[in-house]
Image (cartoon, helix red, strand yellow):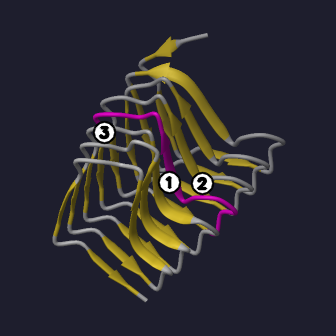
Amino acid sequence: SDSLNNNLTNNIGRSNSISGIVLLSSYNLLTNNTGISNSSFGIYLISSLNKLINNKGTSNSNAGIYFSSTLNTIFINNTGTSDSGEGIYLYYSSNNILINNTGISNSTSAIYLVSSLNNTLKDNTGTSDYTGIYLSSSSDNNTLINNRGNGTVYGIFISSSSNNTLTNNTGTS
């Protein structure tokens, strides 16, 4: 069930059969948590409004950090590394702010938005991922500023999405 006002700091979810850390909850502060080597997601937030700072998802079978139906959340300095899916994945998530997040060596995308609206992505980096930053399936009205896709097949990829604003972004191989 729903819970409120939790503060998660310095926790590790490791080698679980589904996900390392899961919150069906709102108004939380997550700082310095790690989800590593889980069968699905490292950190998984559902239907929530939160603030995430310095969290890591590493070597998970799906996404490092996964957000489903998450609104009005601030993501700062989070990292998804060497995950079999995406580093940071927003699904049906809107009105979020992502600043200085990093995806490194993930199998698909460093940062992936699906059906996610009105988000702001600033100073995020994807390095050695298949796609640095990927907006798909009606990820509309997002703003991307100073993001980088380095050493990727696609630096920034937009598919079936409209009315996005991109300023000073770089994609290099």
Judge left or right: residue 98 versus residue 14.
left
Q: Tell me the crowding category of disc 1: few under 14, some 14 to 19, or many 20 or more residues within 10 angstroms, Cα based.
A: many
Q: Amino acid at mark 1?
A: Ile
Q: Position of residue 135 (x, y in %)?
A: 41, 54
Query: How many labels sit on residues?
Result: 3
Left-right relation of 47 to 62? left
Residue 54 location, quadrant: bottom left
Q: In the rendered structure, which segment of residues is drawn in magenta?
A: 82-96
Quarter of the image with the N terminus is top right
Q: Main secondary structure of the magenta part?
A: loop
Residue type for callout 3:
Asn
Indicate yes or no whether the magenta region holds residue 84.
yes
Q: Is residue 110 above or below residue 129?
A: above
Point 53% across, 46% down: residue? 10
Q: Earlier in the sequence, mark 1 or mark 2?
A: 2
Q: Are marks 1 and 2 in contact (CB under 8 Å)?
A: yes
Q: Nearer the viewer, mark 2 or mark 3?
A: 3
- Residue 96: which disc? 3
Residue assigned mark 1: 88
Circle 2 sits on which residue? 64
Residue 24 x/y as whole percent:
56, 22
Q: Earlier in the sequence, mark 2 or mark 3?
A: 2
Q: As shown in the figure, which amino acid type bears the numbered disc 2?
A: Gly
Q: Measure the C-alpha gap from mark 2 to mark 3.
A: 18 Å
Residue at 41%, 19% in the rendered image: 5
Name the foreground residue: 61 vs 55. 61
Where is residue 56 drawn, in percent x and y? 53, 56
Left or right of 127, for residue 14:
right
Cα separation between marks 3 and 1:
13 Å
